[in-house]
Image (cartoon, rainbow, N blue to C red):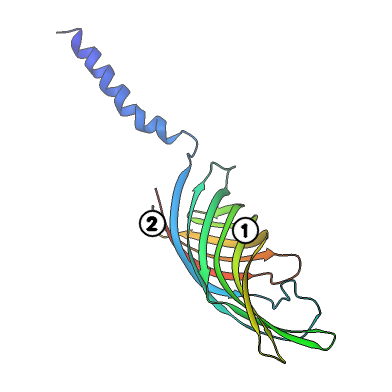
Amino acid sequence: MRRIAPIAAFAAASLAAVPAQAQGVPFVPDIYMGLEVGTGERSPSRFGEDGDIIGSDESNGVDYGAFVGVELPAFPLGYMAVEATIGDSTGETTALVRDGTTDREVTSQARFNWSATARLGLAPLPGLAAYGIAGYGGEQVDITVTDIATGTQFERDDSMDGIIYGLGARYMIGTDVGLRAEYRHRETSGAYDPEQFMIGAFVSF
C-alpha cells in the first residue's frame, strides 16, 4: 500500500500536467463557417458581341452567400486562413453596343458565384485580425441580347472567371463567434469585373 500511494500521486500529477502542456502546443487549425451579405458592383460588358459600347447602365445588386474555411497555424501575431465561398446576386448590367449600323442591347443578370481564396495578415490584438485576400473565382451570368431595330432577342449564359484580390478584417466577439468585413475584386480581363463589399458572421470549431 505504501508503494501504491506514491505511484497514484505521480499519476495524478502527470494527468494534471497534461492540460498545462497542451496549452504550450502551437496553435492548431480551426474550422469555421458562416454567412455573408453585402453589395456587388459589376461593369457593363459586350460579353463577346461585336462592336463598341456607346451607352451603359449598372445597378448595384445585393450579394449574399455562405463560406467555410480553415484558420491555419501562423507566425506570432499573424493570421492565415484558406476559404471556399459560394453565393448569389441580384446585380444587373446593360450595355448598348453598336456594330456599324446595328445597335444591340446586352443585358446581364448575375447568378451563382464561387471562390477559393487565401487570407494572410496580422493579428495585433486579441480577437482582431486584418488581412489581404488572394485567390480565384467565377460567376455564372445570364445574358440577353436584343436587336434594337427588330426587337429580336436571344439568351445565353457565360462564366466570368478570374483572379480575386481584396482586403478584410475580422473580430472574435467570443471564443467561437466572430464578425468580419471584406472588400473583394475579381479581375475578368477588364470586363464585368465584380466588386463586393461584404459583412459576415461565423462560428469556429
The vertical placement of 123 against 110, above or below, is above
Label 2: element kind: loop
Q: Residue furthest right?
A: 100
**Position in image of residue 156 (x %, y %):** 62, 71
Residue 193 as seen in the image, left or right of residue 142: right
Q: Residue furthest left?
A: 1
Q: Name which residue lies at 57% across and 71% down.
A: 197
Quadrant of the drawing holding the N terminus: top left
Residue 167, x across and y down, in percent: 63, 62
Q: Real-space Cα distance between discs 2 and 1?
A: 31 Å
Q: Position of residue 121 (x, y in %)?
A: 61, 53
Work out whether residue 64 or residue 52 is closer to the camera in this orientation and state it: 52
- Is residue 178 in view? no
Q: Which sits earlier in the primary sequence, circle 2 or circle 1?
A: 1
Q: Amino acid at mark 2?
A: Gly
- The local crowd at label 2, few if under 14, some if 14 to 19, many if 20 or more residues have their Cα within 10 Å, is few
Q: From the image, tell me which residue sits under label 2.
A: 174
Give the left or right position of residue 61, taking residue 188 as reference.
Answer: left
Q: Is residue 194 visible?
A: yes
Image point (71%, 90%), residue name: 148
- Mark 1 — residue? 137
Residue at 59% over, 66% down: 140
Residue sitting nearer the eye, 200 or 160: 160
Q: Is residue 200 above or below residue 71?
A: below
